[in-house]
Image: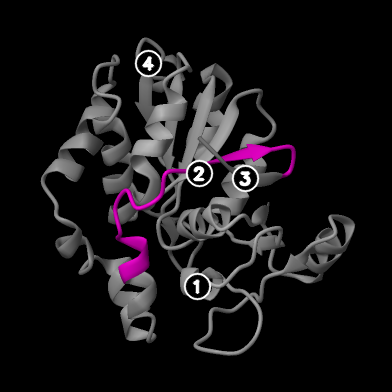
Amino acid sequence: MTDFSQAEFDVRVEWGAPAIEHLAAEADCIVIIDVMSFSTCVSVANERGGVIFPYPWKDASAQQFAAENNAVCAQFDRRFQGPGFTLSPCSLLDMTAGTRLVLPSPNGSALTFQAKAHKAAIFTACFRNLTATARVCEKYRHILIVPAGEKWPDNALRPALEDLAAAGGLVSRLSHRRLSAEARAARAVYQNLTLAELADCGSARELKRRGFASDVGLCLQEDVSDFACQLQDDSFTAIR
């Protein structure tokens, strides 16, 4: 995989699970970006003093994992109303400090679990905390930024434009470092798309069709949080 490793560059960008499989071993820092909605959920919760435990499977084992960690488990399905938390970022806006929440997600959480096999520091980022994330990543020499993407019905990767743009936003804040061609391409996407245009991307259109326009608006707020989100042991917490 030498030709595809981007190893001679400080800042690298590659998609999804293959990025973790093939590039993570040479990274000091891994940043997972799943804008709609795992990374945004983590940011919203962390800035309110919540602790997020990522978990890759939406099944009974998630409830057991929550019990083992003295946490509650988010509902598996995003919904409009009712008690409890879901993968809807808006459902986390009233989270109280100290809440411990298991957040099952087949994209952001699954990539986090995969990345834990490596020695790198692990972060998750979204538009809300790009500058804060860039600030804490500065101390690392080799930074791997992983846009998560989504899944097609056959489970193949669907590259998600919002994840690539947010990855490019992070790259733009690290532009004094040596950037791979892939990182520069992501930066170009970020620099040539407005947040209003991203509100019409496929992922956003799907959420709005399902009635979650408020989630889209929350996901596309830029630099409204001063906190980065770092995985420490098994949970994401806010750091500066």
The residue that appears at 37% across and 25% down in the rendered structure is: 12
Spatial distance from mark 4 to mark 1, Cα to Cα? 34 Å
Mark 4 — residue? 10
Location of residue 216 in the rendering, given as x and y in whole percent from the top left corner: 33, 70
Look at the image and give the residue range highlighted in magenta: 217-234
Relative to 111, does residue 175 appear above or below in the rendering?
A: above
* Labels 2 and 4: the sequence-earlier one: 4
Mark 3 — residue? 237
* Labels 3 and 1: the sequence-earlier one: 1
Mark 1 — residue? 88
Which of the 4 image quarters holds residue 168?
top left
Spatial distance from mark 2 to mark 1, Cα to Cα? 16 Å
Relative to 114, does residue 46 appear above or below in the rendering?
A: below
The residue that appears at 85% across and 59% down in the rendered structure is: 70
- Can I make out residue 55 in this image? no
Q: Amino acid at mark 2?
A: Thr
